[in-house]
């Protein structure tokens, strides 16, 4: 595998096929158990033995599908890593010398594009040298057709491997856990895979603010030391303008186990990260997962059921009010007809919980 577009398409195929095989196994299990109940007497040794046999067949079918998916995707990801490492090990000294000869000479964006066209389309070190020239001349590297660095690419591939593992481990149509919901809606979804292509190929001009947060996270991860990570964290939080985007980055940082506390201390956000690691990240994840599930529902009764389940948990002290969910609802209800109608049919007390301390927003809903 030598192409990020081919890899993400393969992951789409692996994701869809595994989910389909998982669903088929569960449907077969359900039908066979129903047949068993009609044809045998529950509670008898024969019944229990057959029931265990049916469940074992279901479990084995899912395990087989999981192993097949893991093997195919993991081999492709590892092939891609080796391809990228091979490119770094290949040094065209002649072309690199020509580019480095331009150090100290003013160059324009168009001139650098011409150099890349002749020497750098598939030459890692020439691209890095041109990037250095661009920075030397105050030219944004995003104006040039440059690939991301090896560290960023390997981190992206590691993230894909991590999402693959979580998808295969937690996917379930009936599971009520946060992990199961994320496996259904988030891991290796089309938005994630499209973002991967943009980050991998350094095509960032047309990225949304949310995509910019993902790119910032990968850049931070790619920094070699904690001081470098601290500088990247500080710069990213300063440059990301929207609160939603900053929250996405802070969530990713809170879940990252490799970035040490000293990086946050140097960046001046120790207290912020303590809050996120102390519960804020979990509330954020629950809010995003819940809203992703609700946005796809076109039945106001089901939407109200999901929202009231959250309200009941808050009222019974099972979980605190979720400021991120309140924000997501406030942001979404005017854009989504079904959510808007569901809220119109709910009581004032229910709306107060859903919208938080602020008054319920005024105005009608509009179709999405």
Image: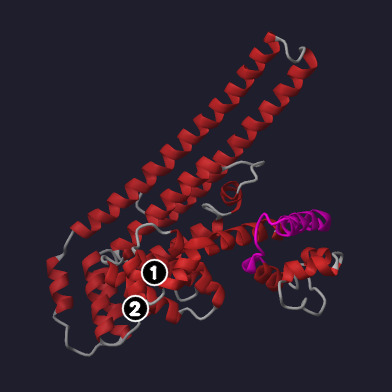
Seen in the image, is 286 located left or right of residue 40?
A: left
Is residue 200 visible to the viewer in this orientation of the structure? Answer: yes
The image position of residue 174, as x and y in percent, is 67, 41
The image position of residue 303, as x and y in percent, is 77, 57
Task: Give the quadrant of residue 215.
Answer: bottom left
Residue ID at (75%, 56%): 312
Is residue 203 visible to the viewer in this orientation of the structure? Answer: no
Highlighted magenta segment, given as a residue range:
297-325
Q: Relative to 34, does residue 88 appear above or below in the rendering?
A: below
Q: In terms of depth relative to the viewer, which is nearer, 56 or 74? A: 56
Instruction: Please tell me whether mark 2 sits on a helix, a strand or a loop.
Output: helix
Q: In terms of depth relative to the viewer, which is nearer, 133 or 56? A: 56
Crowding at dot 1, Cα within 10 Å, few <14 / some 14-19 / many 20+, comes out as many
Q: Earlier in the sequence, mark 1 or mark 2?
A: 2
Residue corresponding to mark 2? 141
User: Is residue 309 located in the magenta-colored stretch of the structure?
Assistant: yes
User: Is residue 26 located in the magenta-colored stretch of the structure?
Assistant: no
Instruction: Please tell me whether mark 1 sits on a helix, a strand or a loop.
Output: loop
Seen in the image, is 344 located left or right of residue 275?
A: right
Q: Are marks 1 and 2 in contact (CB under 8 Å)?
A: yes
Residue ID at (40%, 56%): 4
Q: Relative to 258, does residue 35 appear above or below in the rendering?
A: above
Q: CA distance from mark 1 to mark 2?
A: 9 Å
Residue corresponding to mark 1? 202
Q: Main secondary structure of the magenta part?
A: helix
Task: Give the quadrant of residue 18.
Answer: top right
Residue ID at (69%, 57%): 317
Q: Relative to 119, does residue 53 appear above or below in the rendering?
A: above
The C terminus appears in which quarter of the rendering? bottom right
């Amino acid at each position: 595998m030598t192409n990020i577009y081919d890899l993400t398409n393969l992951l789409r195929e692996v994701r869809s096929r595994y989910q389909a095989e998982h669903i088929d196994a569960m449907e077969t299990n359900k039908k066979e158990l129903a047949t068993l109940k009609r044809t045998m007497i529950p509670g008898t040794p024969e019944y229990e033995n057959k029931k265990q046999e049916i469940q074992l067949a279901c479990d084995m079918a899912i395990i087989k599908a999981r192993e097949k998916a893991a093997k195919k995707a993991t081999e492709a990801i590892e092939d891609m890593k080796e391809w990228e490492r091979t490119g770094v090990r290949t040094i065209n000294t002649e072309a690199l010398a020509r580019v480095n000869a331009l150090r100290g000479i003013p160059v324009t964006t168009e001139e650098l594009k011409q150099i890349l066209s002749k020497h750098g389309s598939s030459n890692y070190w020439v691209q890095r040298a041109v990037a250095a020239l661009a920075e030397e001349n105050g030219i944004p590297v995003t104006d040039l057709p440059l690939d991301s660095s090896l560290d960023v690419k390997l981190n992206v591939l590691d993230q894909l491997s991590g999402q693959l593992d979580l998808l295969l481990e937690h996917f379930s149509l009936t599971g009520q856990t946060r992990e199961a919901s994320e496996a259904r809606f988030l891991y290796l979804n089309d938005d994630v895979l499209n973002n991967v292509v943009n980050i991998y190929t350094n095509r960032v001009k047309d990225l949304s603010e949310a995509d910019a947060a993902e790119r910032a996270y990968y850049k931070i991860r790619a920094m070699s030391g904690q001081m470098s990570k601290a500088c990247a964290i500080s710069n990213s939080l300063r440059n990301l303008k929207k609160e939603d985007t900053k929250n996405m980055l802070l969530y990713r940082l809170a879940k990252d186990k490799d970035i040490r506390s000293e990086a946050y201390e140097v960046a001046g956000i120790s207290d912020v990260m303590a809050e996120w690691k102390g519960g804020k990240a979990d509330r954020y994840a629950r809010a995003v997962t819940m809203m992703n599930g609700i946005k796809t529902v076109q039945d106001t009764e089901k939407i109200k059921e999901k929202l009231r389940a959250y309200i009941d948990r808050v009222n019974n002290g099972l979980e605190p009010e979720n400021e991120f969910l309140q924000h997501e609802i406030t942001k979404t209800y005017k854009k989504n007809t079904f959510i808007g109608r569901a809220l119109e049919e709910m009581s004032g007390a229910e709306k107060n919980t859903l919208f938080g301390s602020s008054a319920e927003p005024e105005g009608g809903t509009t179709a999405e």
